[in-house]
Amino acid sequence: MTRFVFARGLLALVATSLLVSCATQPPADQALTGARQAAFHARVETISEIPVWALDGKLAISDGEDGGSGRLQWRSAFETSRLDFRGALGRGAWQM
């Protein structure tokens, strides 16, 4: 049961993270104008030129009764991206 709760929580976390990262827009009341707009576009250009990056982190999920922890490794190189999730002590590995 704990493994199911952990997997379900992990899947929800990944789905939410991917959805948020793909659909960010500034709120309507904070529209970019003038110098802020130029700075924003310059930053987007700078970031888009980074061909290789990595993210390493720890995860913890709890539903109040059961919980679990694990590690996340996200590697992106040019047009390829890889996500690795590992449960505590390397158990329950999952790749995307």
Image (spheres, rainbow, N blue to C red):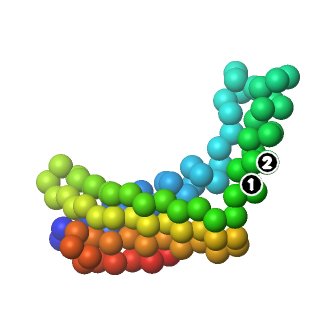
Find out whether the residues at labels 2 and 1 contact each other: C-beta distance under 8 Å. yes
Seen at 64% across and 65% down, the residue is: 52
* Residue ID for mark 1: 48
Seen at 71% across and 27% down, the residue is: 28
Residue 45 at what x, y percent from top left?
A: 79, 48
75 relative to 43, above or below: below
Q: Is residue 70 left or right of residue 18?
A: left
* Residue ID for mark 2: 45
Estimate how packed mark 2 is, as few (under 14), some (14 to 19) or many (20 or more) residues with alpha carbons within 10 Å: few
Seen at 54% across and 73% down, the residue is: 82
Residue 41 at what x, y percent from top left?
A: 80, 39
Residue 16 at what x, y percent from top left?
A: 49, 54
Three-letter code for the amino acid on which mark 2 is drawn: Glu
Estimate how packed mark 1 is, as few (under 14), some (14 to 19) or many (20 or more) residues with alpha carbons within 10 Å: few
69 or 39: nearer the viewer: 39
How many circles with numbers are drawn on the protein? 2
SS for dot 1: helix
Three-letter code for the amino acid on which mark 1 is drawn: Ser
Q: Is residue 41 left or right of residue 12?
A: right
